[in-house]
Amino acid sequence: MVSLMSQSSPVLQAAAPHPSRRWWTLGVVALAQLMVVLDSTVVNIALPSAQNDLGFSDGDRQWIVTAYSLAFGSLLLLGGRLSDLIGRKRTFIIGMVGFAAASALGGAAGSFELLVAARALQGAFGALLAPTALAVLTTTFTVPKERARAFGVFGAIAGAGGAIGLLLGGFLTEYFDWRWNLYINVPIAIVAIIGAAIFVAHIDRTGPRPKLDVPGTILVSGALFSLVYGFSNAETEGWDSPLTWGFLAGAVVLLVAFVLWQRRAAHPLLPLSIVLDRNRGAAYSSVLIAGAGMFGIFLFVTYYLQASLGYEAFQTGLAFLPMIAMLVLAAQLGTNIFVPRFGPKIMVPFGMTLGVIGMVYLTHLDVDSTYAADILPPLMIIGFAMGSIMPASIQTATLGIDRRFAGVASAMVNTSQQVGGSIGTALLNTLAATAATDYLASHLPVTAGVAADAAVHSYATAYWWGAGFFAVGAIMSALLFRTRTDTRARAAAAAAAQDSPAHAPEPVVAH
């Protein structure tokens, strides 16, 4: 149980929207979330075509991805807090307009430098948009049954967006042009902007407006930038690079300074009580670990399908469709049936355990494996795993949060997933590259067959480590999430405290 109190904080008031309006709001939020999540992978498939068109080097190619992830990851908490301060409807529309404009700029880019700048702008507006979308959902759906359904949809999109990006990116690149991987965001954004203007409720604010925590913003933005850049540099330059260690060490120092500042700030960017809540902390940790494992799946299964089995880009996207279907099925079953009955303490470890099984299954792939017998089953298992983990974790991470801090609490979900993806991609890439090098060194002379086997061996190494991520997540989530009995007792105690005559009328969050 956490009590979020601020004597000078304004009160946010909104009438409960009509049920049909709430579901239209979910559609708008889902569009925005899909656009942001799929953009992290949809551009990857277009990179070879963009490179041929604009003529940049292999070394420069990483910046098309890194520019987006650096801006997105470092500005998420700021974006979430801005949505709390200037209003979620206004922030949502600003984020959509900016993201669409940046996408159009990138699609029309005639040079490498302009494309990188457009990707950085996409990341910045995505950091404004993503936490605001989740905060809108959090404050719109307060009825438990409706909330479960809404978060089932949102969690499914959060988990499946990367795979959808692979499918869409392959289709657009193969049948249209690489630029449409960016242009596609414009019509999506236009529909979402119109929907937001009509259906997203405006929340009236009374009382004094709190100030933005400028020192905290600078500290945490610098920390997240250093963290994401450090892991991105490790992916390309290796862990022994001074830039890798320097930025990661800087991230640790800045994060410590941020925490110390938040303990004394009059208007903290991220009230520490949000992350110190046991259930919420367990949810953030679960999203981070699942993000690390999930990005590894997309990365190495994509490499395997295209490089080892010779799949085209669009075929690769189609190969992930059954995983998406299982993820959506698990998300709906979990949020509507299993999470209300068993709680996240059962469902999240269950999903993590399935993730271990699916990853271990993938380690048996070789150059002669077939899709139906060897690839389809583990993808379906992992899809069900992610559908069990993500909706339950996201719903728990935002459950009962004070309306004034819904934006920054939602931003922590996106931050956890982004940092997890950065860690997973960098670490697994490094481990896989080392495994491939060792394999080649021990199988001289190197022939085409040996090189192919070395690649598959490196992927298997990544899958084993991915299984380890999920195993750690299963243990952590089983230990950290509260039991349902404990949660109910704390909620009852909070309600009793609210009803006490001596209790001041301040907002209370109960888990």
Image (tube, rainbow, N blue to C red):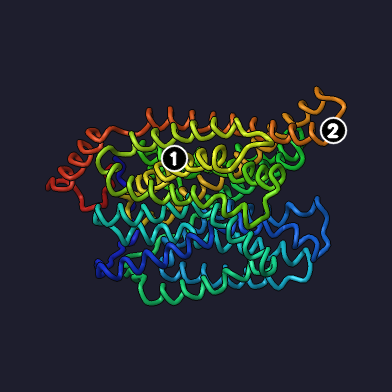
Residue in the picture at 29% in, 40% down: 1
Whether residue 245 is visible: no
Residue at 51%, 38% (x, y): give it: 378
Amino acid type, callout 2 = Thr
Horizontal side of residue 211 vs 54, given as left or right? left
Taking the view exactly as shown, the residue that stands out farthest to the right is 445
Q: Is residue 410 above or below residue 365?
A: below
Would you name the residue on which mark 1 appears? 385
Q: Which of marks 2 and 1 is nearer the N terminus?
A: 1
**Which mark identifies residue 447?**
2
Viewer-closest of 260 and 391? 391
Circle number at residue 393: none
The x and y percentages for residue 63 are 73, 54
Rendered residue at 60%/59% (across/down): 123
Alpha-carbon distance for marks 2 and 1? 38 Å
Q: Quadrant of residue 43?
A: bottom right
Image coords of residue 142 (percent x, y): 27, 57
Kindly identify the amino acid type of the residue bearing the numbered disc 1: Ala
Q: Which of 377 and 363 is in front in this view?
A: 377
